[in-house]
Image (spheres, rainbow, N blue to C red):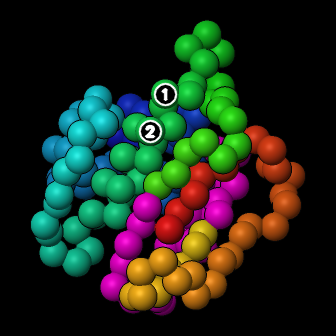
Amino acid sequence: MRSVEELPPCFQPIFSSFKYFNGIQAEMLDFILSSARSFVVSAPTGSGKTVLLELAIVQMLMKHVDRATGAFNHKPGELKAIYMAPLKALVQEKKEEWIAAFGAVGLILVVRQISANIGRVRECIEVPDSPMAGKGLAGMV
């Protein structure tokens, strides 16, 4: 069992809905946080694959943590992560969860939903200005 407290303190709020990573997440934790390598996970629904994606996003964000202060700093618009799902409803659900979770660490999400017709944007959803405005930006597609 691995604790969320093993993450840098500035990113722990992203995982505030639980205290410990499950088996697959605990097994992959070191690999994901110490490497920018691509990986594929095949596991049953509900097994925690999305948390692995969130950990990969944290790994990307960790490059922008000030070692002296532990604060997260970066230029808005320079970071992007892609999330693909087979159902629009699933993307909508994750969008709502991520606005809350990543907003807790000062990120503002821009979510774009793209249709099966490559390159055609069906809708673009931007998070309105918030008290966190200007403190960060992550693009989720």
The magenta stretch spans which residues?
82-110
Give coordinates of residue 26: x percent, y percent.
22, 45
The answer to which quarter of the image holds residue 112 is: bottom right
Q: Is residue 116 above or below residue 103?
A: below
Q: Is residue 21 left or right of residue 11?
A: left
Label 2 crowding class (10 Å Cα cut-off): few <14, some 14-19, many 20+? Answer: some
- Identified at 86% across, 52% down, the residue is 131
Q: Residues within 10 Å of mark 1 (few under 14, many from 20)?
A: few
Q: Which mark is residue 60?
A: 2
Q: Is residue 132 magenta?
A: no
Q: CA distance from mark 2 to mark 1?
A: 6 Å
Indicate the quadrant containing the N terminus: top left, top right, bottom left or bottom right: top left
From the top left corner, tell me how far across and down residue 10 is, in percent.
58, 34
In the picture, the disc for residue 122 is none
> Residue placed at 65% from the left, 33% from the top?
74
Q: Nearer the viewer, residue 13 or 76?
A: 76
Q: Is 113 rendered above or below residue 68?
A: below
**Kind of residue sitting beneath label 2:** Met
